[in-house]
Each structure stands twice: as C-alpha cells, then as structure tokens.
Image (tube, rainbow, N blue to C red):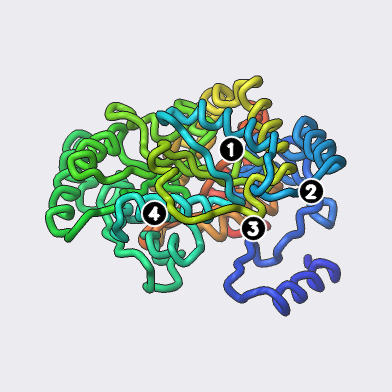
Amino acid sequence: MTTPSRASLHDRHREVLPDWLALYYDEPIELTHGEGRHVWDAEGNKYLDFFGGILTTMTAHALPEVTKAVSEQASRIVHSSTLYLNRPMVELAERVAQLSGLPDARVFFTTSGTEANDTALMLATAYRRSNQILAMRNSYHGRSFSTVGITGNKGWSPTSLSPLQTLYVHGGVRGRGPYAHLSDAEFIDACVADLRDMLGQTRGNVAALIAEPIQGVGGFTSPPDGLYAAFRDVLREHGILWISDEVQTGWGRTGEHFWGWQAHAQSGPPDILTFAKGIGNGMSIGGVVARGDVMNCLDANSISTFGGSPITMAAGLANLSYLLEHDLQGNARRVGGLLIERLRAIAASTPGVREVRGRGLMIGIELESPGPGPDAAQVIESCRARGLLIGKGGGHDSSVLRIAPPMTLTVAEAEEGAGILERALKSSPAGD
C-alpha cells in the first residue's frame, strides 16, 4: 500500500523531473540507507540488493573503508579541478594504468561512463581524423548526443541524429539473429566476414570499433570468447582502433577476468578502454585509459572540472584496494558460478525462461516474450514484494532480468536470492 509520504514524493518527482526519467515499480520506492548487500526503503522494508544501483555499488553498501576515505578527504579539501596537482588522482591513475594491460597507458578521469565513452570517441576520431564508428548491434554506451548515436538498442536511442556515421556489426548477441544456429567457430567466422564486407563499403578511414565485452543494457549478452581478437586482426589491417567499453564488465565482476576484453586477448589489448560505475562504489567516477600516442593526440586545451576530484579519487583508491586485497574477483567467480548453476536448475523446470547466461556476478535470465510465465516487469515486482531488488534489460526482441549484486555476496545470500527468484518466476504478479 502506498503511504502518503511515498505518494507525495512520487508526485513531486513527476512535477519537476522529466517524463522519460523512468522509475522501477508500480509504486516506486525511496531507498534511504544500506549496509553490505542490503538496503532499506523509507518505510523500513529491507531488501537484498541484486542490482547495486545498476552495477555501481561494487563492493558493499556503506563499506567502512570507502566511507572513511571519503570523510577524511572531505575534511581536507573536496574539490580543486584538474588545473592543480592532485595526489589521489595521480595515485589512482597509476594503479588503473598498471591494471589496464595497455602499453604506455595514460588515464583521464570523468564523472560517468557516458562521459568516458564520449572522451574515447573524441580521441579516436581525432587520432584517425574520421567520424566513422563501428558499433555492435544491441549495444548501449550512454545517454549523451554522441553515445546515443552509437547505441544499437532502439529502446535507448531517442534520436537518429548524430555527429558520427555509425555502422553496426554482427556479433554481440550469441543466441539470436542470423548466425545463432552456427557453432562458436562458425559464428566468429561469419561475424568476421560481415566486418570485412562492411569495411569494403566504407569511404575513408574508419576511426574505431567500440564494443562492450558483455552487453549490459542489452541483457548481458556476449559473443563467443575470441570474437574481438578476430576482429582486432582485421581492424589492424586498416589502422582502426578498438575501444573496449568496460563500464559494466570491469574490475573482476565477470570472475574469470579482471577486464572483459581479456576473454578476447589473443591479439593483444584494446587501444582504448573506458570504465566507470563500480570503481567508485557509488561515487561519480568514470575514465578512459588509452595508449600514450592516442591519449596525447589532441592539439587543443582540455580539462575536467569535476573528473578526478580529490573526494571521488579517495573513494576509488579505497574501493579498489579493498577489492584487490579481498580477492573479490575470486569471490565473483566462486559465488557467481554457484548462483548461475542454481538459476539454471530453476530455469530447467520453469516455463517461460529461455536462457540463463552470464559470468561471475553478471547474470541474465532471458524470458520468452511473450511467454507462458510472468513478464520481466511482473517478476521484478514480485521480487521486490519478497525482499529482492533486481534489474531488467534486453533488446528489441528480448526481455531479460539482470542480476549484478555487490561482489562481496555470500553463498547464503546467493541462495536466498535464488529462492526468491524461483518463487517470483513460478508465480503470477507480486503479492501471490
């Protein structure tokens, strides 16, 4: 039942914020505080958080090491801009550069993944002197004018106008489309042939291919391992850069690798890597890592007012240290592996579940759409009513539940969440 305070806040939200600023749930909830893998709403309801503010609360809610670092930095200085030397920014850049796997890596910090991808596109187009971009079908790279122009998902593309000429390549979705029936090796061969054919029709220098190793908003879809390595070989023939969008796949969330591109590493690292979300554990951090010659190709002044602020960098340093010291990549692999197997067992006896896929703590449950079971909106309502928060996504012909808890998730919490999901998938809408 909607309380007066919740209804009032919802009404105020609708009065002053855009109509297109979507809210989850028929009766939206206000989250007031969190701890570990749990959050509470304004009415005192406790939820197990399996979405982490869209893969952003990477380690835990109210992680003491991060809150302490933020508090201590805030007591000294909150902001200075990139016009001044900034010790926390240099220290975090050093760690990110070393972890990136890119040669002669240089790092530029932004405030979001959208801005990081914007910067990567600016670097690539300036370096190659071309506005032509290759992107993947079913992709999502942000909400700005340039990133919407390379997003291959109509649900997140409000305009067809763009400063870029974008050409969409097959390969981001393994289980759907014209190549779905092929073996993995045949799938890669067909996608490479498609890439070569497309390049044969372009005029001038193509700047870059941008790709998410695992597509986030598109429903946690991915190609067979090695696809982007095979693409890389073709791109090198033409001098085309490879941008790996690691906004959702970075920092060990997939369990098997620290970065998503490492599943496609046979032909070397990308030229540019973008990151955001989890590194700040809720603080606004994004960034770009690029080879020195690519990062330094700009011949005009550029700064960032808020990117790399002392307070967000202090949070990022503390969060990254905690993640590495506690082997959260290993935890994502172990607990995520158990969770995926548990969900696949549930799916085997649940009408309407088409596929359970993913790696580590980045898991998608694709529902048949339309299907014999509840749709994604009904499932997330049912989960919320039972004390579990999850996300949703998918492309134009799919409906996917997105599961991405903080990477400190325990086995007991994974089992609890799986049990709630099972009841939600096998029930009618929330409340039954």
Residue 42 sits in which quadrant? bottom right
Against 71, residue 341 (above or below) is: above
Q: Which residue is mark 1?
A: 418
Observer-side mark, 1 or 2, equals 2
Relative to 253, is 197 on the left or the right? left
Mark identifier at residue 58? none
Residues at marks 3 and 2 touching, judged by CB atoms closer than 8 Å? no
Precedes in sequence: disc 3 or disc 4: 4
Observer-side mark, 3 or 2, equals 2
Mark identifier at residue 430? 3
Instruction: Check disc 2 and give the amino acid type.
Output: Trp
Precedes in sequence: disc 1 or disc 3: 1
- Give the quarter of the figure containing the N terminus: bottom right
Residue 8 sits in which quadrant? bottom right
| Marks 1/2: CA–CA distance | 20 Å
SS at mark 2 in the image: strand
| Marks 4/1: CA–CA distance | 28 Å
Instruction: Check disc 3 and give the amino acid type.
Output: Ala
Residues at marks 1 and 2 touching, judged by CB atoms closer than 8 Å? no
Q: Which residue is mark 4?
A: 139
Observer-side mark, 4 or 1, equals 4
Instruction: Check disc 1 and give the amino acid type.
Output: Ala
Classed neighbour count for the residue bearing mark 2: other residues with Cα under 10 Å, few (<14), some (14–19), many (≥20): some
Precedes in sequence: disc 3 or disc 2: 2
Q: Which residue is mark 2?
A: 40
Precedes in sequence: disc 4 or disc 1: 4
Observer-side mark, 3 or 4, equals 4
SS at mark 4 in the image: loop
Viewer-closest of 344 and 11: 11
Residues at marks 3 and 4 touching, judged by CB atoms closer than 8 Å? no
Q: Residue 41: give x, y in percent of width and height.
A: 79, 53
- The residue at the point 27 percent across, 37 percent down is 227
